[in-house]
Amino acid sequence: MYGKNKYNIVVANPAKNITVFVLDNIDKKCYKKVAKEILEKTNYKAEQVGFVKQPKIGGDIRLEMMGGEFCGNASRSLGMLFARKNKIKRGNILVEISGDKILNVNVDLDKETSEIDMPIPIGIETINVDDLGIFPIVIIDGISHIIAQGIDATQENFIKFKKAVYENYDVEAFGVMFLDRQKNYITPVVYVKDTDTTFFESSCGSGTLATVTYLGQDLENGSRKYHINQPGGIIESEINKENGIIKKITIGGIVRLSPKIEIEL
């Protein structure tokens, strides 16, 4: 058994955007290695790995993703994990994320739902992609997303988007939300630079945030709810604006958690 490593994990399933949480206190410089091991050597069909840490800035629990990226689905899942561990049937959990922000997560263990107040996007810019055209890109701290309406979700097209992004931006991670406007359906594809991983994801929380930001541009005041269909299911989202300024965006829905598992890789 020489050379094998043991990890204590929990597997989260928010709309099939499978996330493995590593419960052990892993040094940040090992995140890439551990994440690759878990993604490549397990059968959980995980799309990302998050590391559970002690809070540093006043939250209840802290999440650091494998490449320093932001992940809304993982953040809301971790809120539920904290609630389960501490026998909090329903209420608000404060989840710290990379970049030293605290996000509010509202959980209901009986309903198996978790809703998170997402970071407000920095803005919407445009990006020119060779052979494909000009697209909106929603800038979010930790990850940015292109909204590609009416474009086929192919590896070939994604590579064109990737080339354009890294010619114009220095980002830890980015995604392309291939949008079918009529069906309110996105096919999320996400690239994380530090781990050099690309996933055609089952669902994407930050991608939902970006999509709703884009779809809600015409809203001046009040709230609007969306059900964003994705390969793994539906993520519910609500946007609230005052005088055209976003005040709050939430995403939510069912999250299922495994028991604690010990794995050896």
Image: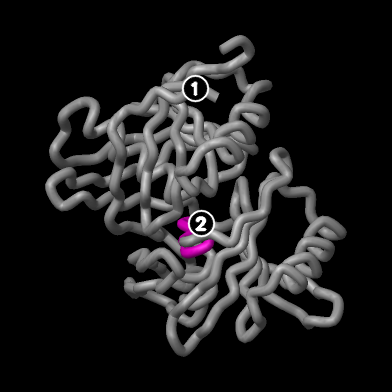
> Judging from the image, what secondary structure is the residue with disc 2 in?
helix
Task: Work out whether residue 263 can be spotted.
Answer: yes
Please state the horizontal and vertical placement of residue 238, each as a whole percent of the image. 35, 66
The quarter of the rendered structure image containing the N terminus is top right
Q: Is residue 90 left or right of residue 198?
A: left
**Label 1's element?**
strand
Relative horizontal placement of residue 22, taking residue 200 as reference (left or right): left
Judge by depth and name the residue closer to the eye, 22 or 262.
Answer: 262
Q: Which residue is mark 2?
A: 206
Residue farthest to the front, as pictured: 1
Q: Which range of residues does the magenta coloring cover?
A: 203-208
> Where is residue 75 drawn, in percent x and y?
42, 42
Q: Is residue 198 above or below residue 231?
A: above
First in residue order: circle 1 vs circle 2: 2
Quarter-of-image position of residue 165: bottom right
Q: Amino acid at mark 2?
A: Ser
Mark 1 residue crowding within 10 angstroms, few (<14) / some (14–19) / many (20+): few
Report if residue 139 is visible in the image. no
Residue 175 image-quadrant placement: bottom right
Q: Provide the major secondary structure of the magenta segment.
A: helix
Mark 1 is on which residue type?
Glu
| Quadrant of the rendering where the C terminus is positioned | top right
* Residue bearing the label numbered 1: 264
Whether the magenta-drawn stretch holds residue 154 is answered as no
Distance of label 1 from label 2 (alpha carbons):
31 Å
Q: Residue at x 67, y 54 (%)?
A: 198
